[in-house]
Image: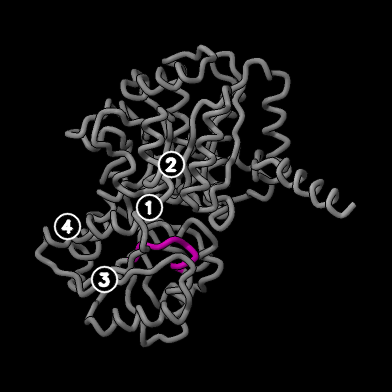
Amino acid sequence: MLIRLIIFLMLCCMALPLIAQTDAETEQSSEAGAGAQQKLMRLYIDADNSISRNATQSIYRGIYTALQEHDFQLQGYQFEIVIRDHRGNSSRSKVNLKSFLEDDQGLLVFGGLHSPPLLANKAFINQQKILLLDPWAAAAPITRSNGVDNWIYRLSVDDSKAGEFITAHAVDEEGFRQPYLLLENTGWGRSNEKNMLKALADRGIEVAGIGWFNWSLGKYNAKTMLRQARQSGADVIFLVANAPEGKVLLQAMAEDPSLSLPVRSHWGITGGDFAIDVSAEARALADLKFIQTRFSFFELPRAPLAEQVLQQARINFDGLVSPRDIKAPAGFIHAYDLTRVLIAAIQQAGLSGDVVTDRANIRDALNNLQVSVKGLIKTYKQPFTAYLPQRPDAHEALGLSDLRMAYFNQQGNIILESE
């Protein structure tokens, strides 16, 4: 009996849906697909829905809101969203991608916050011709291939621009001269090291030092790294971290203010509960600023589209009353805009019902979009073109002019600095 009970419980766990939403959102998604099982398309999200759940849920909500504008129906097909949780693990992500390929109604995949799974599986994605849309992960190599067979498109920050932007703001505008790089020890961190060092070298500046940390950074190691940064003579820290590790570093500063330095950060810290777990006083001690794209629901007056999207989000999602309730807002904003671009490409390409053919046709449409698409960040006019190695930005929808620096206010809301 005990063995049967264990087997039964294991089967139940395996059967649990991986669509990690609130109950209300699950009901809405189920209703959207009801009665259309014969003509159904699924959009997958392969992301960390555990530690970085806020970012993944924000991406889901952005996609959902854009699809809802079309009642989840395009070209006679009903659309559903499926979340697969890779938990930041590249091997688990590959399993999810293989599972996606087995779904003859799986049209394409959205990526999540983490760059390493996309970097590790980039060759597999391109070889298998998986159409993948990236609304967050920023490592520069993600959208760049040695050949023309490139199936990854990004509407997000691109580290080849982020390093330059953070450096320009800190050095050219604020006058810092001795930055210390604190970098996540992953492909994302190494991508930023390369681009930040180049941006600094272009200005004749050498770094005071470089420190590397792994995921699950502890407070003791954080203090050791901060002490090394202080001893190097640095006048600012360039931080490339996600929320868990960024939180530990700033809390370590708060516990020992003698270790504090101004922090200019990548935006990975905005993907979790950083502003909840790190006090306003700790954030102020670090003079924390970080990169974002150039749209915020907090900026007034809101454009008509932004007001419409916010009002619809209030209806869609329980507990969402004001912009401060949109956690990890970059995920929502980018996923909404990217889904609008996708919808325009689907309408241009049409759908045959054969997902392999449809992926190729949508890819062709993305490379040559014939209509402008109004989004929250901007209006997109041919955001992508066919990829060639000599056109490294062909699959990048955003550029330097779309970036801004931002900060958390006292309430933990993300506020863009004025241009």
Q: Which residue is mark 1?
A: 292
Spatial CA distance of label 1 from label 3 is 23 Å
Give the left or right position of residue 158, taking residue 307 as reference: left
The numbered mark, 4 or 3, whose residue comes first in the sequence reads 4
Q: Quadrant of residue 146?
A: top left
Mark 3, residues whose alpha carbon is within 10 Å: few (<14), some, or many (≥20)?
Answer: some
Residue annotated with mark 3: 210
Q: Amino acid at mark 1?
A: Gln
Distance of label 4 from label 3 (alpha carbons): 14 Å
Looking at the rendered structure, the kind of residue marked 3 is Ile
Query: For mark 4, what is the residue?
Result: 198
Q: Write down the residue under mark 2.
A: 135
Residue 62: % across, % down: 53, 39
For label 2, the SS is loop
Question: Is 244 covered by the magenta stretch?
Answer: yes
Could you tell whether 106 is left or right of 302 in the image? right
Image coordinates for residue 329, horizontal then vertical, percent: 49, 50
* Relative depth, front residue between 347 and 206: 206
Give me the residue at 23% from left, 74% from top. Answer: 209
Dots 1, 3 in contact, CB < 8 A: no
Is residue 285 shown above or below 307? below
Mark 1 or 3: the one toward you: 3
Query: Could one spot residue 216 in this view of the protein?
Result: yes
Q: Disc 1, disc 2: CB below 8 Å?
A: no
